[in-house]
Image (tube, rainbow, N blue to C red):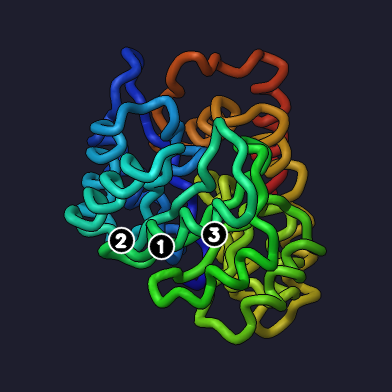
Amino acid sequence: MDGIAPPLVTPFDEDGDVDHERLRELVAWVEDRGVDFIAPCGSNSEAELMTAAERAAVVETVADAASVPVVAGTGSPGLKETLQATESAASVGADAALVVTPFYYSFDQSELEAYFTEVADASPIPIYLYSVPAYTDTVIEPETVGRIATHPNVAGMKDSQADIAEFVRTRRRVEDAAFDLLIGSASVLSQALDAGGTGGINALANLYPEHLADVYETHRDDPAAARALNARLVELNTAVTATYGIPGLKWAMRYRGAPAGHSRTPHSPPSDDARDHLEALVDDLRT
């Protein structure tokens, strides 16, 4: 997949249940603002706070509502559950699967390579590797990515390290493969595009999809202008990721008028000070 996608937030109602009607509205909201594809059940979707049945239902709703491709998060710590989720996502119309590195236990690079190869062998749809060491404490090394990229059912990777040097190292090792290399941090989207990236799956695309789409489109003809556009987004992106997390992202979305719904326990709402800060940052981008 090329272009920009949100790791789509999951709207929950005040009782903590998935709000499927609002989820459909959110799909239309981000599509109307220029996303190229949608990635439900990722980290910002609170996927790990949902049951397997809930995740499957979310993917089905998104796939049914979307007119753009859907790359569904299906990874779990164990192979069996990952394969079950991937097959389920394929059966309801997902175009590809985003498979996070196995987590909880530690695995070496040879074990990661074997795992992703086995997933790719069995998956009925193409898979994307997902490296997010902030949550999993696991990194897929560039050399490992290069070997996995030769598999015909491995379509690419979402790299959420926000480390451009490592991104470049990975890009060099997949140059000869049909392999989409997507950045996970909106703060360095333009730099990743400079380095040969094909797009981004970015939390900020839930809140300001049109601005990230603008960075992506502008980069084709004017990389310097794209970097300037991207620079305006860094403070807000930091606020809705590292500083205030998913509750802050959802609050900012609601403030902007997006049908984000609520977060699920044990997340808690942002403080008054956090809301004031987020409000000021969102307002700044309106000027």
Task: Please say whether residue 84 is visible from this viewpoint.
Answer: yes
Q: State the image quarter where residue 283 is shown.
A: top right
Q: Hey, what amino acid is under mark 2?
A: Ser
Whichever of callouts 3 and 1 sits on the residue coming sooner in the sequence is 3
Work out whether residue 176 or residue 283 is closer to the camera in this orientation and state it.
Answer: 176
* Labels 3 and 1 touching (C-beta < 8 A): no
Q: Disc 2 vs disc 1: which is toward the camera?
A: 2
**x, y percent for residue 138:** 65, 44
Q: Name the element at disc 3.
A: helix
Q: State the image quarter where residue 170 is shown.
A: bottom right
Give the answer, above or below, for where 75 lies relative to 164.
above
* Labels 2 and 1 touching (C-beta < 8 A): yes
* Labels 3 and 2 touching (C-beta < 8 A): no
Give the answer, above or below, for where 59 lies relative to 273.
below
Q: Disc 3 vs disc 1: which is toward the camera?
A: 3
Q: CA distance from mark 2 to mark 1?
A: 7 Å
Mark 2 surroundings: few (<14), some (14-19) or many (≥20) residues within 10 A? many
What residue is shown at x 33% (from left), y 21% (from top)?
13
**x, y percent for residue 97:** 38, 57
Q: Which mark is residue 127?
A: 1
**x, y percent for residue 221:** 68, 85
Q: State the image quarter where residue 258 is shown.
A: top left
**x, y percent for residue 56:** 25, 40
What residue is shown at x 68% (from left), y 44% (from top)?
237
Q: Hey, what amino acid is under mark 3?
A: Glu
Q: Which residue is mark 2?
A: 123
Give the answer, above or below, for where 13 lies relative to 147.
above
Q: CA distance from mark 3 to mark 1?
A: 13 Å
Q: Which mark is residue 113?
A: 3
What residue is shown at x 34% (from left), y 59% (from top)?
70
